[in-house]
Amino acid sequence: MSDPELLPISEPPRRLEILTGVGRRRTWSADAKARIVAESQASGASVCAVARRHGLTPQQLFTWRREARQRASSTAGTPAFVPVVLEPAATTRPKPPRRTRPAPAVEIEVAGLLVRVPPGMDAATIAAVLQAAKARP
């Protein structure tokens, strides 16, 4: 019994492919990556099938998915802009008595609570207070 790999080739190869030039990696735009990642996260989608359809390895697609999750979690804690409602001052209402302390610079209503933010408060403290207000039962 002999190993077929060690036997001489009975006929020459019919096709020979020679690659010339410098091989380079493909580049994907951020939009294309986001679209492919979203497609792979759809209900019932197979990561391997999506990767094959776009000419990727599953490992590359898993890396893109992990990077997208990390970007989403890093931006989750950043303060976002909220709409501001300005109410016109009533002309018939008497002026309140003069306060001994300065009035708050900003009032924020969140989760049914009114949060008064004094001038000079740092953003981290404001974010922690708003997060606690949203998390209350």
Image (tube, rainbow, N blue to C red):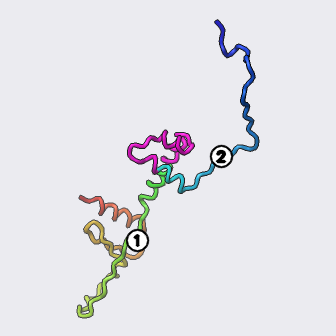
Q: Residue at x 70, y 14 (%)?
A: 6
* Nearest to N terminus: mark 1 or mark 2: 2
| Residue at the (46%, 46%) spot, across then down | 40
Residue 17 image offset from top left, x and y in percent: 72, 34
Mark pair 1, 2: CA separation: 49 Å
| Marker disc for residue 10 | none
- Where residue 111 sits: x, y (%)? 27, 66
Structural crowding at the residue carrying mark 1, measured as other residues with C-alpha within 10 Å and reported as few (<14), some (14–19) or many (≥20) = few
SS at mark 2 in the image: loop
* Residue 105 in the image, given as x and y percentages of width and height: 37, 78
Which residue position holds label 1?
Answer: 121
**Magenta stretch containing residue 76, yes or no?**
no
The residue shown at (37%, 73%) is 83
Q: Position of residue 18 (x, y in %)?
A: 75, 36
For the residue pair 77 and 54, the one nearer the viewer reads as: 54
Rendered residue at 55%/43% (across/down): 60
Up-down relation of residue 18 to residue 105 (above or below): above
Q: Is residue 41 above or below residue 125?
A: above
Residue located farthest toward the top when viewing the structure as drawn:
1
In the picture, measured across the screen, residue 97 lies left or right of residue 84, that is left
First to last magenta residue range: 38-66
Q: Which residue is mark 2?
A: 25
Asked whether 56 falls inside the magenta stretch, the response is yes
Q: Is residue 18 above or below residue 29?
A: above
For mark 2, does the 10 Å Cα neighbourhood hold few (<14), some (14 to 19), or many (20 or more) residues? few
1 is higher (above) or lower (below) than 85: above
Q: Is residue 82 left or right of residue 93?
A: right
